Image (tube, rainbow, N blue to C red):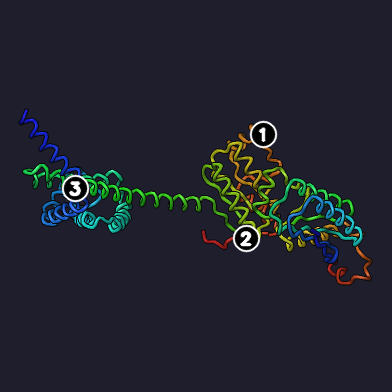
Amino acid sequence: MKGSRSYAAAAARALQSKSIPGPESTTSLLRELVAHLRQNRTQLREEWARRITEAELLTAMTKEEVFAEATSVYDNYVEALETGTFEALQAYARNLSERIIPRGVETHEVIGIVLLLRDVLARSLFAKYQGDFTKLNRILDAYEPAANRIANTVSVGFVQERERIIREQQEAIRELSTPVLQVRERLLILPIIGVIDPQRARQLTEQLLRGIRTNRAKVVVIDITGVAAMDATVANHLVQTVEASRLLGATVIVTGLSPEIAQTLVTIGVDLGKMTTVGDLQGGIEEAERLLGYKVMQFSSDAVDA
Amino acid sequence: MDVPVLKQGPYLIATVQSALTDADLAQLRRTLVEQVGRYRSRGLIVDVTAVDVLDSFACRTLRDIAHMTGFRGAETVIVGIHADLAFAMVQLGLSLEGVATALDLEEGLAYLNRKQRAAKAAAPGLRPPAGKSPTRDRRGH
């Protein structure tokens, strides 16, 4: 009876001491922790690098590179623990991501190595304070939230960087996917390649109408040789684009309708009567030149040595 | 809001400077059809560069103007339709069918000049007597 009461009292004391580590004591604990990490820097760093290699993470990088990066991550990690501010670490994580993403490092690897570091450090804490369970608990109370936050910061930084790159690439693809090219004074061509979804169709129209205005085009050749299939929505959109171009004073010639598309259009009954269509791009450009009053002729048959 | 109508050689140029009410549009139609006859114009340009909204009534009125002036001997060209406006009009099915359109005033004038030349070439009998226009005669031969 007595024994159990004293045990309960001790547990309560331990709990109390655990549950009210004021900000001051957390700070001092963190300081102690940082001092420990600084002291064992070399050993812990090596241990960490070894664990990374063991887990077969960062295989895209050489051993030396992994070690060098591990060192700077480690130092940044300790600094973040010490100062409690994450800006420097964030900047470093962004910088690191910029360097390693092009080399094909995956998200799981980055998260993996940060969690490994967390484990390695926690293990060293277990080893150091194995005799004093209460102290270990308090140290871990100080360490865990900070360590989790660091892991979070690094992972988020990596993912954000990745997303930024994806956004940039999407933008680039979108820009590239609808070029409006001037081939002669007042003659534009718009080669379309790939699948046209409603969003791309809208963008295409926008670019074309803007192009007509800026280049003062009279004739536009839309070449759809590279379009594999077309549904009713997109076909109607195409007809509308042709009509809108006419309102801006430009004539549109559509070229390169594949047999499949021609058949689809006839089957779904799209009214193509309003459009001028020519078999291939060459024919379309010749027709456009005729409309613009150009006459192209060969003045010498041996102009090119073939 | 009154729409100024300028006479430029054989053509009339009406520049719409803001959104028009239905009454303004009806007034514009009356004015233009009347003036085309008074000045014996061969062509009419309606410039809508300053307009960013054309509703169905406005489109119908523009089409009516084109057809009415056509009956009175002047071809109408609508110029300066904005790209966004053009696509919105087409989506609403207001595509001004049978009415000539051009990018801007300059293009509109070029279009009318081309039409005039073509008309003259197609009907040589309607040319002025030879003695009065020696330059044209020389070019003709």
Q: As drawn, is A298 to the left or to the right of A99?
A: right
Mark 1 and mark 2: Cα distance apart in space? 34 Å
> Residue A269, which numbered label?
1
Mark 3 and mark 2: Cα distance apart in space? 69 Å
Quadrant in which residue A230 is drawn? top right
Q: Earlier in the sequence, mark 3 or mark 2?
A: 3
Position of the N terminus of chain A, as image quadrant, is top left
How crowded pointer 2 is (Cα within 10 Å; few <14, some 14-19, many 20+) is rated as: few
Mark 1 and mark 3: Cα distance apart in space? 77 Å
- Residue corresponding to mark 3: A21
Where is residue A169 shown, x and y percent of the image? 43, 51
Comparing labels 1 and 3, the label whose residue is closer to the camera: 3
Where is residue A142 shown, x and y percent of the image? 20, 48
Chain that bears disc 1: A
Quadrant in which residue B19 is drawn? bottom right
Q: Answer above or below: position of B2 versus B96.
A: below
Quadrant in which residue B92 is drawn? top right
- Residue corresponding to mark 2: A214
Chain that bears disc 3: A
* Labels 1 and 3 positioned on one and the same chain: yes
- Specify the amino acid type for callout 2: Thr
How crowded pointer 1 is (Cα within 10 Å; few <14, some 14-19, many 20+) is rated as: few
Residue at the spot 19% in from the left edge and 51% down from the top edge: A26
Q: Which of marks 1 and 2 is nearer the N terminus?
A: 2
Q: Between A132 and A154, which is closer to the camera in this rendering?
A: A132
Q: Can residue A117 be seen in this view?
A: no
Where is residue A122 shown, x and y percent of the image? 16, 45
